[in-house]
């Protein structure tokens, strides 16, 4: 990850924390991208930091039957 990408990522995480601290709800797909109808991608750790810093609750959910 280059310096510009790293700074962009940090800015996005800071903005997410601020949104949560101000009472907004967000929907995150922690695997980042689709890997096919039945396959989850690898989860990215960044969202765990956002949850920890904001003290927000996490409500897991599944979206099924979305294959085209």
Image: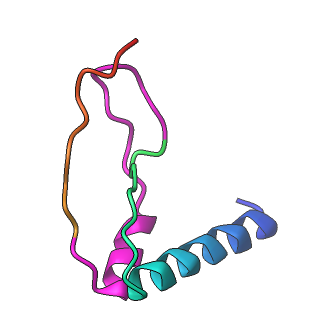
In the image, is residue 48 part of the stretch drawn in magenta? yes
Determine the residue positioned at 40% across, 55% down: 28
Q: Is residue 58 left or right of residue 15?
A: left
Q: Along the horizontal axis of the image, is 19 left or right of 1?
A: left
Magenta-highlighted residues? 33-57
The part of the image, by quadrant, that contains residue 6 is bottom right
Residue 65: image quadrant is top left
Q: Residue at x 40, y 66 (%)?
A: 47
Q: How is the image coloured?
A: rainbow
- Say if 50 sits above or below 61 in the image: below
Q: Quadrant of the N terminus?
A: bottom right
Does residue 34 lie above or below 10 as drawn?
above
Left/right placement of residue 43 relative to residue 38 reads right
- List x then y, in percent, for residue 25: 36, 69
Q: Residue furthest top?
A: 68
The vertical placement of 54 against 59, above or below, is: below
Choose between 55 and 22: the one closer to the eye: 22
């Amino acid at each position: 990850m280059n310096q510009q990408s790293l700074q962009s990522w940090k800015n996005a995480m800071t903005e997410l924390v601020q949104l949560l601290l101000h009472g907004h709800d967000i929907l995150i797909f922690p695997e980042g991208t689709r890997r096919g109808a039945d396959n989850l991608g690898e989860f990215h750790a960044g969202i765990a930091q956002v949850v920890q810093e904001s003290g927000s609750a996490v409500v897991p959910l599944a979206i099924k039957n979305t294959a085209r």
